[in-house]
Image (cartoon, grey):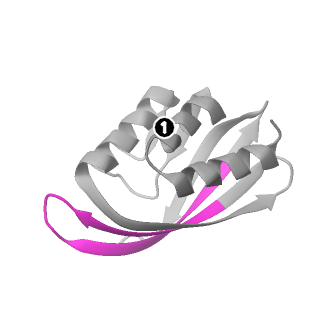
Amino acid sequence: MDMKEIAKELVAGCRAGGAKVRENLDALYSDDAVSVEAADMGGQGRETHGKAGIHGKHDWWDSSMEEHSTKVVGPFYHGEDQFSVMFEVDATDKESGKRFQMQEIGVYHVADGKITREEFHYAVE
């Protein structure tokens, strides 16, 4: 797959949600992909390495947050090896019960037909 095909498939999976997100992680990401957050999420640090680690991030989010809605905008292309996606999320932290809305931009780097790095940009307070 080329970068634009990967981007479109990632966005379609994010819009579908559920199992499709996990399937896309397995199909579209390189085995040694790196995921970088703007801030330490859940005490695990900012960087996560490998598909298993990225699956773990998704597990943490799913167990910690209740998503009410997610809007996915994009993809937006940058050259031949990067694209970005904007996410607008309405969720509740299950532990505190606090509901919040956030906007996040995911920047994805592609090499050899796979996502090799994702970086998430969002407001950190």
Instruction: Tell me if mark 1 has few (under 14), some (14-19) or many (20+) residues whose alpha carbon lies within 10 angstroms of its own.
Output: some
Q: In the image, residue 43 lies at what x, y percent?
A: 27, 46
Seen from this angle, which residue lies furthest left?
Answer: 96
Image quarter of residue 3: top right
Q: Is residue 108 left or right of residue 77?
A: left
Which residue is at 48% across, 51% downward?
17
Query: Residue at coordinates 44% horizontally, 27% vertically from top-left?
Result: 52
Q: Position of residue 72 (x, y in %)?
A: 57, 65
Q: Nearer the viewer, residue 92 or 119?
A: 92
Q: State the residue at coordinates (37%, 35%).
A: 56
Is residue 101 left or right of 31 when viewed as pictured? left
Residue 88 magenta-highlighted: yes
Q: Secondary structure at mark 1?
A: helix
| Image quarter of the C terminus | bottom left
Q: Is residue 29 visible?
A: no
Q: Position of residue 24 (x, y in %)?
A: 58, 38
- Residue at image position (74%, 41%) is 110
The quarter of the picture where the N terminus appears is top right
Residue annotated with mark 1: 22
- Which SS type dominates the magenta stretch? strand
- Please, is residue 114 above or below residue 73 in the view? above
Magenta residues span 85-108
Instruction: Name the residue at the right extreme.
Output: 80
Nearer to us in this view, 64 or 111: 64
Tell me residue 5's x, y (percent).
Answer: 78, 45
Q: Is residue 14 magenta?
A: no
- 83 relative to 31 in the view: left or right: right
Q: Amino acid at mark 1?
A: Arg
